[in-house]
Amino acid sequence: DAGVIQSPRHEVTEMGQEVTLRCKPISGHNSLFWYRQTMMRGLELLIYFNNNVPIDDSGMPEDRFSAKMPNASFSTLKIQPSEPRDSAVYFCASSFAGRGGRNEQFFGPGTRLTVL
Amino acid sequence: GDSVTQMEGPVTLSEEAFLTINCTYTATGYPSLFWYVQYPGEGLQLLLKATKADDKGSNKGFEATYRKETTSFHLEKGSVQVSDSAVYFCALSDYGGATNKLIFGTGTLLAVQP
């Protein structure tokens, strides 16, 4: 299994530009999570989906952030417009939820975003 | 709500020293407990887990025992190596939870010197 795939691995953009981060979860997993990691705030859960439906987006910092999961094998996190304080590493993780699920999340390698 | 508290780092040890990273939790139900490790420049990886009281999770020489009476899940290793240098996260999830949401601690940086 290829694991959770994220793209791009690195993104450098200018303030005000739109940024789209992509994630492909592990096949068969039905939960998907977006996290943000910074030195100041540590690891933060932004939003998670169960069976492609957003369950809790209370961690999304502002309306500039949006996430979609159009099908079981793809999700996007979009920032529009981007700001320098959005600079962070963004992780996607997936797991299998439900009876018999092991509650274990598998993380992707992350996207390092730098907003100038 | 549920929460995880782990000792602040950095923890600096010499190679072959004994490691303990403390983790305590607060939960209303019967959570599963996890330790994740993050090596520099990488995502988090599951190190070990325990799903019920008195369970011991172990992997790569690391161990942690689920202690319900003290609500703790301390990580231990008898002899650390330089390659163990990483950030370690303690986490919990509700037992049988339908969403698999994890609550993470703040992470503890371990630096092992040769």
Image (cartoon, coloured by chain):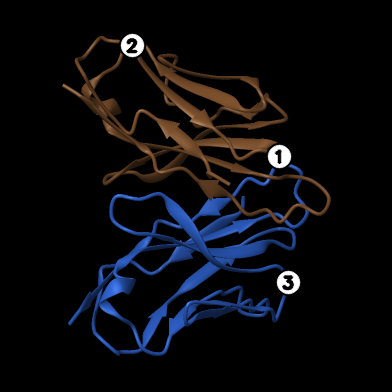
Chain colours: A brown, B blue
Please say if A87 is above or below A42. above
Chain hosting mark 3: B
Secondary element at image label 3:
loop
Secondary element at image label 2:
loop
| Residue of label 3 | B52
Q: Left or right: where does residue B72 sit relative to residue A27?
A: left
Chain hosting mark 1: A
Q: Left or right: where does residue B59 sit relative to residue B87?
A: right
Q: Which mark is residue A28?
A: 1
Within 10 Å of disc 3 (Cα), the crowding (few <14, some 14-19, many 20+) is some
Residue placed at 40% from the left, 14% from the top? A64
Are the residues flagged by discs 2 and 3 from a single subunit? no
Dot in front, 2 or 1: 1
Q: Amino acid at mark 1?
A: Gly
Residue placed at 46% from the left, 25% from the top? A22
Task: Calculate the distance from the C-alpha at mark 1 to the C-alpha at mark 3.
Answer: 26 Å
Where does the image place residue B38, in percent across and percent down from the top left? 38, 58
Residue placed at 21% from the left, 14% from the top? A15
Secondary element at image label 1:
loop
Where does the image place residue B31, in percent across and percent down from the top left? 69, 61
Q: Quadrant of the C terminus of chain A?
A: top left
Disc with the residue nearer the chain's start (2 vs 1): 2
Are the residues flagged by discs 1 and 3 from a single subunit? no
Where does the image place residue A62, in percent across and percent down from the top left? 42, 19
